[in-house]
Amino acid sequence: MSPAALPRRTSFLAALSSVLPYDPPVSATVALRTAGATADARPVADTDTAAGPPPASNVPDPSHPLEDPAPSAKAVDAAYRPRAAVPTWIPARITSPRGASVGVPTAQPTSSTSVGLARLVASRASWGATPQLVADIRASGATAWIDAQLAPSSKVPDTEVDALVAKEWPRLKLQTWEVRDQYHPSSTGDLGVDVIAAYVARAVWSKRQLLEVMVDFWTNHLVVTAPWGEAWDSVHRFHIDVVRKHALGRYADMLVASAKHPAMLNQLDNASSTKRSPNENYGRELLELHTVGVDGGYAESDIRRSALVLTGLSTERESGEYLYRHIRHHRGAVSLLGWSDGNASAYGEPVATSYLVHLARHPRTARRIATKLAVRFVSDTPPSSLVDRLAKVYLDNDTKIAPVVRALLTSSEFAASAGKKTKRPLENIISTARVLGVRPGPDTADWLGGLVWTAKRAGQAPMGWPAPNGYPDVAGAWAGAGAVLTAWNWHMSQCWEVGSDTPRVTYPPLRSLLPATLPATHGQLVDALATRLVGAPLPAAKRDAVCAFVERTAASPLKASDPAASWRLPYLVALVLDTPEFATR
């Protein structure tokens, strides 16, 4: 792009402080003072494109408030204070690129669910809030919406996305033996690439959003790496037959299915473990990561016992499918963590199953899973009282996940947790597509490939975490500049692609993000964009900084021919998406 197309964008971004949901007031004065300074560095985005006529001048108006003396600390704090949202959530008019309707939210609230709670549920229980989703939650009520999402197969049809997955990635139907037969004698990353693309597609477009959030949760709990790795031939089946199948079911069933799946058996080396040469890798991670946790009360000697119980769980050499090899199974009495078995038979598969179910039902496993869920949905440091209640629900329901999630999402702690979670890079990227209204198009697979590549650059390649402990879900792990700048670049690239002559997917026009009647001032324009994209107006300081980017004040009158409402609108949209408010889960 020409430097004139984005005057001062790099310096402007300093006014947005950090992408964390907490704005340190001490930096606000500097941010406000530098928001209008001319950028010496090249703009954040790399792509060059014509963006319309340049502004008349890049020199700040001498009368602009940014040229006044530095404000007092009290004034700065007031400028960064959250502003009240509009009285009611009124979704913006949405049209397709050719003017046909693409589903204007029409549902009217019939429940007592507030806008704030509906948006919190939409933000946490999906891959990104949209006006339509918020309207749906208000119309049905938060609890009723959650209940439907927890019973997706019977209450939330998803035929459109199911058809998309079947059409774009037909190889996902292959069983492990069929993959080996088709690719013999080589290995391949094809199935891993396919399952990643389908996983991301469902995150963007599925109506079963809570299921997709839980699929992501379990993908980072029972880790099998894709697209390449020891599970190259079976990772797709693990995702379908273990994670997706049991994501809202009993954890005991998921754990047993995981332990007997060739993907996990190869990922953590249990396929090669024998009574004479036990491999302790899976036996250790089963205790440390999948169940009771590193502080679960077991001794180092228990890790060897765990590995011995699991000997025999293996794979068939030629097909790669699961096979119990009784000749490899260790026999002899064994006990650990309150479980014991005489283990007298070489046919020890029932013994392994009994051990796995015992671990799934262990109180420390209950607390570990309750803690991880509370961290995912409430805060990086959830209250112990909430964790205790969730662990009890888990145990009282024999490891069923849905009742735990329901108790969590309907808790007072959840309702009070707004602003306490930050999106990880992949969530930021996917939620951008969702809030912009992206739909599948002529080259959906290529667009999804770009999304996956962008997430990898940001440090969160889908299903790509190399260690068995999964991607972290706390803000501090994602505060690096690389993740932030990559997300910002994605925001800008998507706003540019809206106007592309050859878009790979379908975008509504950016003008549809605004009310049917153009706002009267530049400040109202920014407020309308922020309300549509993040659910509420930005704090006054950030609104003023966005206005300064187009050399206007919040009070400057707005005409349809003004750059902010025409050729510079993509940049304003991207800048609102760059704010900490959008980065907040």
Image (cartoon, grey):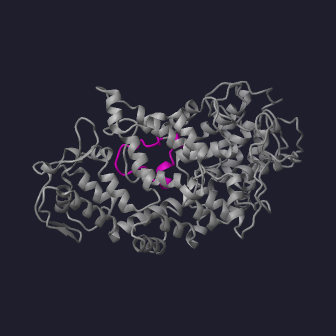
Q: Position of residue 309 (x, y in %)?
A: 19, 58
Residue 464 located within the stretch drawn in magenta: yes
- Give me the residue at 54% from left, 55% from top: 153
Q: What stretch is highlighted in magenta?
A: 459-485
Q: Where is residue 67 in the image (x, y as percent from the top left)?
A: 78, 45
Q: Indicate the quadrant where residue 387 lies.
A: bottom left
| Residue 34 in view of the camera | no
- Frontmost residue, 401 versus 381: 401
Compared with 503, 337 (above or below) is: below
Compared with 540, 101 (above or below) is: above
Q: Where is residue 52 in the image (x, y as percent from the top left)?
A: 78, 27
Number of callouts in the render?
Answer: 0
Q: Where is residue 388 in the image (x, y as percent from the top left)?
A: 43, 74
Q: In which quarter of the image is the C terminus?
A: bottom right
Q: Quadrant of the N terminus?
A: top right
Determine whether, in the image, residue 69 is placed left or right of residue 578: right
| Residue 39 in view of the camera | yes
- Frontmost residue, 127 versus 73: 127
Determine whether, in the image, residue 426 is placed left or right of residue 549: left
- Give me the residue at 23% from left, 48% from top: 270
Q: Indicate the quadrant where residue 39 lies.
A: top right
Q: Main secondary structure of the magenta part?
A: loop
Compared with 159, 2 (above or below) is: above
Residue 142 located within the stretch drawn in magenta: no
- Frontmost residue, 318 versus 282: 318
